Amino acid sequence: EVISGLRVYVMLDISGSMSQSIEGAKGYLAKFLQGFPVEQTHVCVFNTSARDVVIKHPSAAGVEHAFKGFSAGGGTDHGAAVLHMARHAPAPDEDALFIFVGDQEDRRFTAAVQRSGLKPVAFGFLMVGPTAAYWDAVDGTAAELGIPCFRIEESTFSDPYAVTRTLRGLIASTPTGAISSRQATPSLVATILATDLLEKPVWAT
């Protein structure tokens, strides 16, 4: 129910800059992906090209097995990951959510997102490993697209229920349906701000 009407695209950076962080990143994903239905989730790893990660069973063991054999190396091209994901188009009544795991050491990839046709309503970003302040591939691309970019904290994974709470919070503060053909649903914050709290309830009028 939490991600009804949402298709999730998870992209893990395995470029050379991730050599000290990739095992930790895979460990976080092994826990994180258990909160997503397999049929609505697409996962890939990327450096300058991208490859699908097939998760046959949404358990810790299943996710860990799916990521076996991937090691860090090569350059970084987030655009390659996004264009690779274009083969998994969302259904007409689904919105797309992109989740990136990495250090965002890359140029912005706005044009690739636009070419993909996936039209994400938001980015989620799990920063793994240190990075220089001038790199902003994920944050900057979201800003250019005019969509929210939510940071996912590593501390989330210490609580088995925190993944669902994090996702619920992300969805509640993002206007789902704003990009797809169905009518936009206002965010929770917008709904609260638009409500006249001093208005008499129906039973009192």
Image: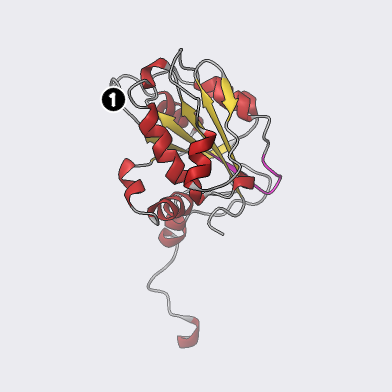
The residue nearer to you, when weighing 98 against 122, is: 98
- Asked whether 85 falls inside the magenta stretch, the response is no
Look at mark 1 in the image and give the residue it sits on: 130
Q: Residue at x 28, y 25 (%)?
A: 130
Q: Residue at x 44, y 65 (%)?
A: 195
For the stretch drawn in magenta, what is the main secondary structure?
A: loop
The boundaries of the magenta stretch are 90-97
| Residue closest to the far top | 74
Mark 1: which amino acid? Pro
Query: What is the number of callouts on the image?
Result: 1
Quarter residue 91 falls in: top right
Residue 182 vertical placement versus 152 (above, below): below
**Residue 63 visible in the snapshot:** yes
The residue nearer to you, when weighing 95 against 189, is: 95
Q: Position of residue 154 (x, y in %)?
A: 33, 41
Quarter residue 106 falls in: top left
Q: Position of residue 8 (x, y in %)?
A: 56, 42
Q: Residue at x 46, y 20 (%)?
A: 108
User: Helix or strand or loop: what does disc 1 sit on?
Assistant: loop
Q: Position of residue 147 (x, y in %)?
A: 48, 37
Q: Tell me the crowding category of disc 1: few under 14, some 14 to 19, or many 20 or more residues within 10 angstroms, Cα based.
A: some
- Asked whether 93 falls inside the magenta stretch, the response is yes
The residue nearer to you, when weighing 111 against 83, is: 83
The colour scheme is: secondary structure
